[in-house]
Amino acid sequence: MAEKNTHTKHEDNLKKKIVVKDEVIVEQKKEIRGLRKIVSDEAVEFKKSFSNKISLLLISAFGLAAALAWNGLIRDIITLYIVPYLGEKSGIKSQLIYAVTVTILAVLVTYLLSRFTTKKKLKRN
């Protein structure tokens, strides 16, 4: 009979250990689900951020290409129309006219873009 009691106690101890292990497994599964959610959210945020950065880089590249095209056009216009009036040795004067023209153009474009973005922000609100 004592042997049966010992055997029953041993079984009860094993059952308790199994219940505890099952509870631990359930908790670990909850933790894993939480971690998966965090990783998934981070992946979505990374994807958005990556897309935004790539878009910004592409826009910057096209902006640079456009600026170089305008640069060439302005230089050609100055060479074609201004240099003949100022003479062949008008290097510094031509550069000054070029710099002022580009500065005015840059200020104008910046001003117009800032007004455009401000209006868009106001419409959203």
Image (tube, helix red, strand yellow):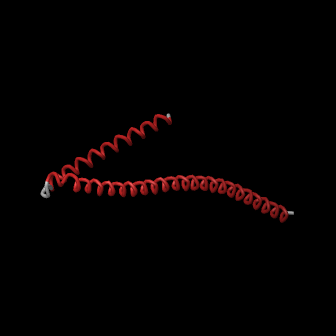
Towards the viewer: 92 or 84: 84
| Residue 74 % position (x, y) | 27, 53
| Residue 26 % position (x, y) | 69, 55
Q: In which quarter of the image is residue 65?
A: bottom left
Towards the viewer: 114 or 100: 100
Side of 5 where 87 appears, left or right? left
Q: Which residue is drawn at 30% across and 55% down?
A: 73
Q: Which residue is drawn at 81% across and 64% down?
A: 7
Total count of labels: 0
Towards the viewer: 5 or 64: 64
Side of 33 where 16 appears, left or right? right
Kindly give the residue lying farthest to the bottom in the view shown. Answer: 3
Q: Residue at x 46, y 34 (%)?
A: 122
Image quarter where the N terminus lies is bottom right
Kindly give the residue lying farthest to the right in the view shown. Answer: 1
Q: Which residue is drawn at 36% across and 55% down?
A: 66
Side of 83 where 111 appears, left or right? right
Residue 77's place in the image compared with 104, above or below, is: below
| Residue 55 % position (x, y) | 46, 55
Side of 85 where 30 appears, left or right? right
